[in-house]
Image (cartoon, rainbow, N blue to C red):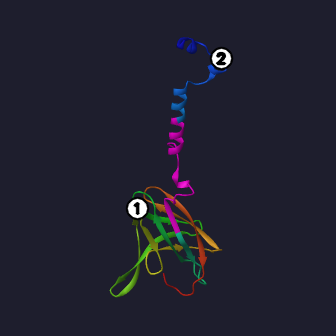
Amino acid sequence: MFNDLRIKKSAHSASRLPAGRFILTLGIFIAFTACGGATTDTSTSTSAAPLLEVSNAKVRGLLPDRNMTAAYFTLKNNRPAAITLNGAKSASAGKVEMHTVEMVAEQMRMRPLSEVLIESGQSAMFVSGGHHLMLFDVADIQASMAITLQFTDGTELPVEFSKVDIAGGGH
């Protein structure tokens, strides 16, 4: 009796997968889609934070008869490892340098800064009176300026810096 049931198949049921194979295939499909697959890029996910996050990006407007200015921002490293910022560039400036301000013989002095290490989960602040970007040979700044941050691992991060008009000199 059982042998007869296994032998008798209709044309309709012949195209179906056996139940065990179907369940196995379904399980693999669910596991693969639940994990997101091997090629999922979490940096583009709307729920995940970007790997490198820039906030408060501001560039000072040019003072009359001047062609250099300063830019400020906060950079947060959401990567699992440290990253090193080692420069910046802009099509709107002839040269961009990283600088810092430090106390030397009871005077505040500006000096070039070759790199800034940002540990995983930490932020680096570029502010007036501390680390900042100096932009040289700037012809004009409209409402904003594009500046690309450069890292030792070859990563480049384009950032739009909003123009702010601030009276006075200071860095």
Q: Residue 162 appears in which quarter of the rendering? A: bottom right
Q: Using a 10 Å C-alpha cutoff, classify the residue at mark 1 as few (fewer than 14 neighbours), some (14 to 19) or many (20 or more).
A: some
> What x and y, as percent, mark residue 116?
40, 67
Residue 2: x and y in percent read 53, 14
Between 32 and 73, which is closer to the camera in this rendering? Answer: 32
Q: Residue at x 39, y 60 (%)?
A: 82
Quadrant of the image for the N terminus?
Answer: top right
**Magenta segment: does it hold 52?**
yes
Range of residues picked out in magenta: 27-54
Indicate which label's residue lies in the foreground, 1 or 2. 2
Q: Is residue 24 above or below residue 59?
A: above
Label 1 or label 2, whichever comes before in sequence order: 2
Q: Amino acid at mark 2?
A: Ser
Q: Is residue 15 above or below residue 26?
A: above
- Find residue 10 and name its label: 2
Mark 1 and mark 2 in contact? Answer it, CB < 8 Å. no
- Circle 1 sits on which residue? 120
121 or 154, nearer to the observer:
121
Residue farthest along the right direction in this orientation: 12
For mark 2, give the secondary structure.
loop
